[in-house]
Image (cartoon, helix red, strand yellow):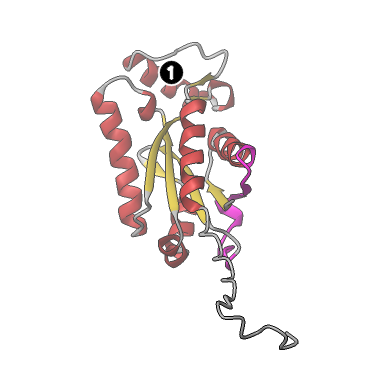
């Protein structure tokens, strides 16, 4: 089974929840997983992991600086190991093609800036965390949601993350990250019995 590192960046907490659920999904499939906030994580590889998944959320068109720094500082390891990037945004929850395109552009921008080419990239729908926004942000997000035909009830949060799809993505990545099994030792053949009685 694979040993996985999950690094995340979060603002309102949804991406932290996503990262923790990713770890749960991996463990339920028999893998091991460590979850680390990018703010407290620099270089933590040291040969301990078979694969790395990075999750970051989009705010005003950009992902967290801490995650970008992590990707840049660990680019060699991310290029050497199987790696995946999960870009979390409200645009990924949109029903229109332009919204999906916006989510893809944000992910592509992050990867260009990091110089990273992961083998898996996924766009993950986030949440409207009205109860965790300050007043100004709450009003702004409500206006954006109204403009886009989204949820405008600010008395509660609205979660759009597709947990079943996330589970499938994590299980697929974990399978790809599994190390190759060690070859079994070849048995010594003695076709003519030359070792017979030799005391070995």
Magenta-tinted stretch: 27-47
User: Toward which corner of the image does residue 191 lie, by quadrant?
Assistant: bottom right
Residue occupying the point 51% across, 55% down: 51
Marker count (numbered):
1
Q: Could you say where residue 83 lies in the image, as x and y percent from the top left? A: 44, 53
Q: Nearer the viewer, residue 93 or 133?
A: 93
In the rendered image, the residue lying farthest to the right is: 199
Question: Which residue has dot 1 on it?
Answer: 142
Residue occupying the point 55% across, 32% down: 14
Q: Is residue 38 above or below residue 194?
A: above
Q: In this view, does 64 lie above or below 179?
A: above
Residue occupying the point 34% across, 52% down: 111
User: Is residue 40 inside the magenta stretch?
Assistant: yes
Q: Nearer the viewer, residue 186 or 122?
A: 186
Residue 131 falls left or right of residue 106: right
Q: Which of 12 and 76 is in front in this view?
A: 76
Q: Could you say where residue 32 lies in the image, as x and y percent from the top left? A: 64, 49
Q: Is residue 57 above or below residue 117?
A: above
Question: Are there few (<14), some (14-19), or many (20+) residues within 10 Å of tag 1?
Answer: some
Q: Which of 107 and 198 is in front in this view?
A: 198
User: Is residue 182 inside the magenta stretch?
Assistant: no
Q: Could you say where residue 24 lies in the image, as x and y percent from the top left? A: 63, 37
In the rendered image, the residue lying farthest to the bottom is: 198
Q: In which quarter of the image is the C terminus?
A: bottom right
Which structural element holds mark 1?
Answer: helix
User: Toward which corner of the image does residue 12 lie, by quadrant?
Assistant: top right
Q: Could you say where residue 97 lies in the image, as x and y percent from the top left? A: 24, 25
């Amino acid at each position: 089974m694979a040993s996985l590192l999950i690094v995340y960046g979060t603002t309102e907490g949804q991406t932290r929840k996503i990262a923790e659920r990713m770890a749960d999904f991996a463990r339920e499939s028999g893998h091991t997983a460590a979850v680390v906030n990018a703010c407290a994580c620099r270089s933590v590889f040291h040969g301990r992991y078979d694969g790395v998944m990075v999750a970051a959320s989009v705010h005003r068109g950009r992902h967290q600086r801490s995650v970008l720094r992590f990707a840049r500082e660990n680019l060699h390891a991310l290029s050497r190991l199987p790696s995946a990037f999960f870009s979390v945004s409200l645009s990924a929850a949109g029903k229109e093609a332009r919204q999906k395109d916006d989510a893809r552009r944000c992910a592509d921008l992050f990867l260009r800036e990091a110089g990273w080419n992961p083998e898996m990239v996924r766009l993950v729908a986030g949440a409207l965390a009205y109860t965790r926004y300050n007043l100004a942000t709450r009003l702004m997000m409500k206006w954006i949601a109204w403009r886009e035909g989204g949820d405008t009830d600010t008395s509660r949060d609205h979660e759009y993350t597709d947990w079943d799809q996330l589970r499938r993505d994590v299980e697929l990545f974990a399978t790809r990250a599994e190390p190759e099994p060690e070859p079994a030792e070849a048995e010594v053949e003695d076709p003519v019995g030359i070792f017979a009685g030799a005391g070995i």
